[in-house]
Amino acid sequence: MTDTNHYVCTGRVVRDVDEKSFSTSTYGSRLNFSMAVTKTTMKKDKTFEDYVSYFDVVLWGKNADKFKPYCKKGTMVSVEGELRQDRWEDKNDHSKKSRINIVAKNVLLVELPGKESGSSGGQGNKSCPNDEGFPEDYPF
């Protein structure tokens, strides 16, 4: 059996992208953003409990260029990619550090903040792709 590194999650962008998170290098454009993924479980007393995980995501190339205008706080996205561990040594105390990022191959818009959904019943859910405001060439 071969090793597999494939990760898919759906969650919300945690904060608006800033210019430090978007750069152009010899490898093309790079966009860094963070997302929150919530898992809801039922406890023994039949109440629900949310567990939120936060992930750092790196998106490269043309996909980074296309997604940048939509990378706003609250945007619901689905991310497909692989997990990559960065390792380094702290310069101050020489301790070993590590962080796991999602290196995205595809980022799909699920909802945009600020647009009302017809099926939301006025509960504040936002609209899904294919509504006005999405570029025709955006890969849904």
Image (spheres, rainbow, N blue to C red):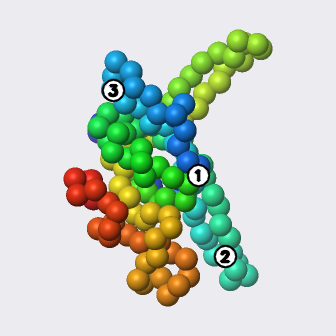
Q: How many marks?
A: 3
Residue 135 located left or right of residue 37: left
Question: Which one is in front in this view, the residue at disc 1 or the one at disc 2?
Answer: 1
Q: Residue at x 49, y 59 (%)?
A: 75
Q: Is residue 13 above or below residue 64?
A: below
Q: Of helix, strand and loop, which one carries label 2?
A: strand
Q: Residue at x 42, y 44 (%)?
A: 68
Query: Marks 3 and 1, how far apart in space?
Result: 24 Å
Query: Marks 3 and 2, how far apart in space?
Result: 44 Å
Q: Is residue 32 visible?
A: yes
Tag 3: amino acid: Gly
Residue 125 point in image, percent of width and height: 51, 75
Residue positioned most to the front: 133
Mark 2 crowd level (few <14, some 14–19, many ≥20, 10 Å Cα): few
Q: Is residue 81 visible?
A: no
In what quadrant of the picture does the C terminus appear?
A: bottom left
* Residue 14 marker: 1
Residue positioned most to the bottom: 121
* Residue 48 marker: 2
Q: Earlier in the sequence, mark 3 or mark 2?
A: 3
- Determine which quarter of the picture holds residue 98: top right
Residue 105 point in image, percent of width and height: 33, 42
* Residue 28 marker: 3
Residue 52 located left or right of residue 59: right
Q: Of helix, strand and loop, which one carries label 1?
A: loop
Residue 138 point in image, percent of width and height: 27, 53
Tag 1: amino acid: Val
Tag 2: amino acid: Phe
Q: Earlier in the sequence, mark 1 or mark 2?
A: 1
- Determine which quarter of the picture holds residue 111: bottom left
Q: Is residue 28 above or below residue 90?
A: below
